[in-house]
Image (cartoon, grey):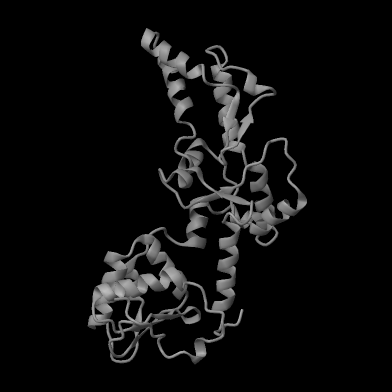
Amino acid sequence: MHSTDQSGPYRDSITCICSDICSQRLSLFILCPNGRTNSGSNCDQWIPNVYSPDEIIFNRTINHYRFVGQLMVREQIISEDIEAIDQQSFTMINQMEQLLENNDQTDEIQDLLSSILDQLRFEVVSSNGTTFELIPNGQQIPVTMSNLKEYCERYRNYRLNEFHRQIEFIRQGLYSIIPGYYLNLFTANELEEAVCGKGEIDIELLKRHTNYNSSYSQDSVVIERFWTVLGQMFTEEQKKIILDILFPSNSFHVTNGPIDGALPRSHTCSFALDLPEYSSTDVMYDRLNYAITYCSSIDGDGNMNEMPDPVSFADDD
């Protein structure tokens, strides 16, 4: 990488590594079922890839999981954790168990149960869409009223433990750096917030900790436009991207003169944003959105120092 600054290129490299780890380029992680179906919550979450319970995980893959070290505390996984990434995971068996508990013997309910059971075998569809047998030769064994309870128990047990080996390898990698007894002081949610921050960006908090250079202040028109774009027009995902680009200091620079064809420039090392004095809020939104969409990585072609401040582009119109 041919880039200059004080630590931004290093952090950008780590960001790229993490993006590759949670992508389809590697087989370590897969997008959660909610993400693949675009339903429910946590659609942006990646989970460990699924292997057959009897499949050997090779040492190279084990070492990759240890390297990642992202599952940080030893909390027991419960059904709600699985449903958070796959809202359909337990829907069917929950409904069947509820019908059994209610002991509803009406013909309509019995016919409904029978129609469902006729399609079931002792197998389960995993988080990556692969079907596995819950017992030997399970694909040939039908689920009946007499063995429904056993089926539900085996189904739940599989879904709760389908990537327990991968999780253990990840813990081993993490504990090789940070002693487990320290991490056990945190719940999973507490540690996620400590490492990743809150899920929503607090714009008012960001305003209070932003410094402006030159003759600009929070009341300047261009600054007010920026906060309007960030607070009212950007989605949470767009806000996260622009803060990732700026992390981790707190300065704000504005380039004098209206340059609607120019893009903003960020300095990752010092959390500084060079913002052209755009002529309108809509133009500012367009340029900021373009920058975070197409120019989010540190430029590595070695030409940034020779470019004017900021880079000038022809109007899109």
Query: In this view of the protein, which residue sits in the foreground, 34 or 139?
Result: 139
**Residue 65, percent from left and from top:** 67, 54
Query: Residue 177 is drawn in which quadrant?
Result: bottom right
Question: Is residue 93 shown above or below 227?
Answer: above
**Residue 307, percent from left and from top:** 46, 89
Q: Is residue 272 visible?
A: yes
Q: Is residue 106 visible?
A: no
Residue at 34% in and 61% down? 235
The quarter of the image holding the C terminus is bottom left
Query: Residue 310 is drawn in which quadrant?
Result: bottom left
Residue at 29% in and 70% down? 229
Question: Is residue 291 shown above or below 191?
Answer: below
Residue at 26% in and 72% down? 282
137 to the left or right of 209 = right
Question: Is residue 47 shown above or below 106?
Answer: below
Residue at 46% in and 27% down? 92
For this orientation, the residue located farthest to the right is 59
**Residue 169, percent from left and from top:** 69, 50
The quarter of the image holding the N terminus is bottom right
**Residue 91, percent from left and from top:** 45, 30
For this orientation, the residue located farthest to the front is 317
242 to the left or right of 15 = left
246 to the left or right of 133 = left
Number of numbered discs present? 0
